[in-house]
Image: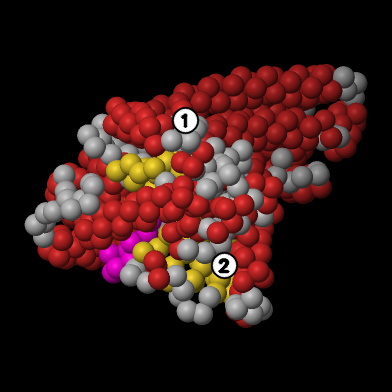
Amino acid sequence: MPEGATDCSFDDKAARCRIRSILDFVQKILDVYQFDDDKRMRFFSELNSISQKIEDSALYLGVLGEFATGKSTFINALIRSDLLKKQITSGTTAAPTIIRYGKPMDIRVKYLDGSAEHFSKHYNPKDGTVFRNYLHHVSANEEVSKTVKEVVVYYPSDKLADGLVIVDMPGVNADERRHLEVTRNAIKEVCDAVIVVMHSVHHFTGSLEQFIYENLQDQIHRCIFVINQIDLLDNKSDRDMVHKSVSAKVSRSFGIKKPHLFCVSSLSLFDHANNGAMSNEKRKELQREFEQMEKNVVSILKQQRVHIQTERTASLLLESLSNISGEIKKQENVYASMHDALSKNQVPDIKAFTHTYIDSYQKDLDNNCVSAKDEMNRFLSAKKKEAGDLISSRINGCSSKDMLKSLVEKLDSTYLDGIIKEINQTLENHLGGMEQAGKSKMKRFESDFSQIYQSLKTLGGKINAHSSSPAISEESREHILKKGASSAITAINSSIEDSQGKTSLGVGMGVAVAILLPGIGLVLGAILGGVVGWLFGQSLSDMKAECIRKIKGSLEESFKTIQAECAAAIENRKTRVLGDMKDIILGYVQQYEKLLAEMNERDNRMADELARLQKMSKNHMKQLEDESRWLAGLKKELMLH
């Protein structure tokens, strides 16, 4: 049995069958969860690659090495062809190059932008020089290769006819960081096994050791180590010393008891080796050693091919399951968080809130109403005195009956109209203030209500209620004053009927004067018009006194009426403002309760759905954990074979 070859009775067929069933299971559950598009595409891409790999009988052998270790020459030696250029000045591999069996020769290039190119569509595949130059152009020319995803070479080498596929990768100590990423990705996504090519002089370097440690942990036990350019060492004892030293270091660094390690000269397989210092005898000896290495490597790979492929598939699937499990766990956490939000969705007692709010505002409004009435009464008292003093002053200023008569007949009511307008404006201000207070209170309610609304974590959208209270209805000031004037005129007419035989004239004059005075609805105008009937039957002083007494009495009654009407107007405005506010609040509450009912219904549905999703995700996580444990056990078992 060749060095490193092992025998086992592991059931690869059953393992691969279970891997297929795991793939089917994972692809089904991916349709259940709301992964974002990028993750979903990545997961499906990974699973598709794994599915293709498990059905692919070819063995992908990566050839890894540092720059100038003779890696390209080694690959050429394996396929017995000068396919890859190996001159240092021509550059190094910069794109992953997959070399597999194929007739006729061809090169297929896949670019990162999704496009593809076939050599045979543009060139003659039989022209070896053009073929090699084109391959070098797309795989080693950095300006081109940085746009290349993969280069596949179809080559009719007998060494590849049995399903061996060679993967040439950039050197691990290349200056270009991109080259390292290309190599890492090729190892992870393409290679089943790896041959590590080292230089006979500068063999196991620190940079190579670090790269292997970081990128080949899953495959290190199946790596084959080759010390190339052994022809540079003069004698066999030197070669044996290098072999022993490297073997010990690999074993110590990676915990491999007996690594697969071979010393070869790739150059010895080519006729041009004679052009150097190598003798024919040495060349033939090194050829035999290379061919023996080749037989051993092929034997190892053949015996372990199915194990390697199964292990590789298991490793890829295990990593994919870990990624998917992590995403499902995140989804489960989202479900749990939403469920927790529902359970904490404490709904405030909106009716109690609104009743408390309305009661509080009604008290405020009652206080405002009392204050407005008091201020209005003080204002009316002042204006009543002002009107009485004005009329008394003018009457007392009359020096004859004719003058008094003229005063009454021609009394200019402009100033009295001003007093009435002041009364009207003051009442308007108080009513407007109550209205404005209602609007301000409504804004505070809406602000507080908005906070309650927003506290419902699962209730989305906005309440479509009025953003501010509607205009509060206006009272007719003219109606109030007309009503007051009418009461005053009735009182004055009663006094006219008691006058000395002047009743008929008095009534006629009173009505006539009231009609002639500007603004028949003005209280004071009605009072003055009413006294004309009895004004001329007495002495001047008596008439002045009587006129002043009657007018002040009428003013007293009239202002009592105005005071009552103003108080009624304030009370009515309070009732209207409070009513309007209640109507608006009721609108909010009705919408709130409607939305709350919808929310509760939706929350109940969501709670049921979350419970279902949580149960499902837990089951899927359990299955994924079970499958992951099996895959991990499979990997461990395969590593022993």
Which residue is found at the position 89% from the left and 34% from the top? 406
Say which quarter of the image contains residue 398.
top right
Q: Position of residue 478 (x, y in %)?
A: 66, 45
The stretch drawn in magenta includes residue 543: no
Circles 1 and 2: CB atoms closer than 8 Å: no
Give the mark nearer the N terminus: 1 vs 2: 2
Out of 538 and 120, give the one closest to the viewer. Answer: 120
Q: Where is mark 1, residue-wise?
A: 205
Which residue is found at the position 26% from the left and 31% from the top? 255
Which residue is found at the position 52% from the left and 64% from the top? 81
Q: Where is mark 2, residue-wise?
A: 109
**Residue type marked 2:** Val
Q: Is residue 341 visible?
A: no
Above or below residue 129? Residue 457 is above
Out of 618 and 408, give the one closest to the viewer. Answer: 618
Colour logic: secondary structure
**Residue type marked 1:** Thr
Q: Position of residue 9 (x, y in %)?
A: 9, 57
Say which quarter of the image contains residue 26.
bottom left
Q: Position of residue 502 (x, y in %)?
A: 72, 41
Residue stretch rendered in magenta on the structure: 51-61
**Label 2's element?**
strand
Mark nearer the viewer, 1 or 2: 1
The stretch drawn in magenta includes residue 56: yes
Cα separation between marks 1 and 2: 33 Å
